Image: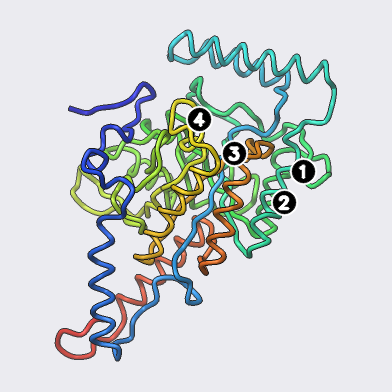
Amino acid sequence: MRTRDQWGNWEWPFAESQREGKLYRPWLDEPLAELRHCLMQEYPEWPWEPLWPDGRSFALCLTHDVDIVSQHATGWAFLRSFYRMRQAQERKKEQAKRLIWTGISAVSGWIRNSKDPLWHYEDWLSLEDRFGFRSTFFFFPSHLIKPAVWDANYHFDDEIIFAKRPMTVSQMMQVIHRAGWEIGLHGSYYSATETGILRCEREQIETVIEDTVISIRQHWLHYDITRTPRLQVEAELRCDSTQGFNRSIGFRAGTSFPYWCWDHRTQSALPILEIPLHVMDGALFTTNALEYDAELAVHHCIQLMDRVAQVGGCLTLNWHPNYLNDSKWWSVYQALLEEGARRNAWGCTAGQLYAWWIQRESRLQWAPSHGIGAMP
């Protein structure tokens, strides 16, 4: 039986690892890390390929899902919400709630006519740059072939303030990209399961930044293992970071390392690298999830970081930038970056991790052997 939650997702209560008490451990990695350690002690002369660049002890893949760019919705956003309500097939109650919120937000913005409290997204870049880290910002496309009521509702032409300068969303994307951060695709809800959508959405992002987009995370973590990976390959994407949980943290696939996705139809590997998602802010704090305070959130995340560091893996974080002004959400993210830097972690984007991983695989593949039983 295929068990799904109300949003069509396979969530943590359905996981066998959760029932067996293994959800918070990279249980697949632990015996392999022990084997690697033993072999390195026994055969120090072998040319061991490092797991991460520059002698880093583990990787910290930093990501942001850009769902909202303004606290005050515009009139155009209200009209887009109304259009989607008419077009979408989701529950009427959910549609009405979204439309009412957008309308109230739009009216509030008109009445206040004040600076939007979200218009200092550059603080995310400043924080990460303090530690020499970089992150991926997954942006939504403007044009949706099949909109859902849950999809993001901003447009590339929306006017905002970024780095104390007025600009459009597309210009903000360009500034972030040119500063050395990565812009990826935040695929719409239906793009995860229906053909002919993802390529159009990827091309929209590429047109804005004038560069290739290789990374994706599906909105709402909507994902089907029998369909989504192949749709991503067909759209010429190269790495995904969707496989995690909306309402819990942990190792959904039992591993902290990236892995190649599997095509269940052909029973073969697909050329799209999965960078599993381990910690999402909403899973830590929201009322339908773990509901942690800041202290407990940091404590649990550091436990996961401990276990990732022990196996030399990668811990992937996802923080939504629209929670910029929530002190709890911000302070926990800052604490995790500080701890990662203290432990000599590699704070990287999804694209940087993908590039490193395929280069490492290539070096391993072409490394010469060194006698019977030797490892590259």
Do we see residue 134 in this rendering? Answer: yes
Q: Find disc 3 in the rendering and name its residue.
A: 66
Badge 4 amino acid: Thr
Confirm or deny contact between disc 3 and disc 1 (CB under 8 A). no
Confirm or deny contact between disc 1 and disc 2 (CB under 8 A). yes
Q: What is the number of the mark on residue 175? A: 2
Q: Could you say which is closer to the camera, residue 263 or residue 131?
A: 131
Badge 3 amino acid: Val
Q: Earlier in the sequence, mark 2 or mark 4?
A: 2
Q: Look at 28% across and 86% down and name the residue there.
A: 368
Classify residue 39 by image quadrant. Answer: bottom left
Quarter of the image for the N terminus: give it: top left
Relative to 295, residue 177 above or below: below
Q: Look at 67% across and 21% down and name the residue there.
A: 77
Q: Earlier in the sequence, mark 1 or mark 2?
A: 1
Tag in front: 2 or 3: 3
Q: Could you classify mark 2 by the number of other residues whose Cα lies within 10 Å: few (under 14), some (14-19), or many (20 or more)?
A: some
| Rendered location of residue 355, percent (x, y) | 46, 64
Badge 1 amino acid: Phe
Q: CA distance from mark 1 to mark 2?
A: 9 Å
Do we see residue 196 in this rendering? Answer: no
* Number of on-image labels: 4
Q: Secondary structure at mark 4?
A: loop
Q: Could you classify mark 1 by the number of other residues whose Cα lies within 10 Å: few (under 14), some (14-19), or many (20 or more)?
A: many
Q: Find disc 4 in the rendering and name its residue.
A: 286
| Rendered location of residue 250, percent (x, y) | 37, 46
Confirm or deny contact between disc 2 and disc 3 (CB under 8 A). no
Instruction: Say left or right for 278 vs 184.
Output: left
Q: Find disc 1 in the rendering and name its residue.
A: 162
Q: Earlier in the sequence, mark 2 or mark 3?
A: 3
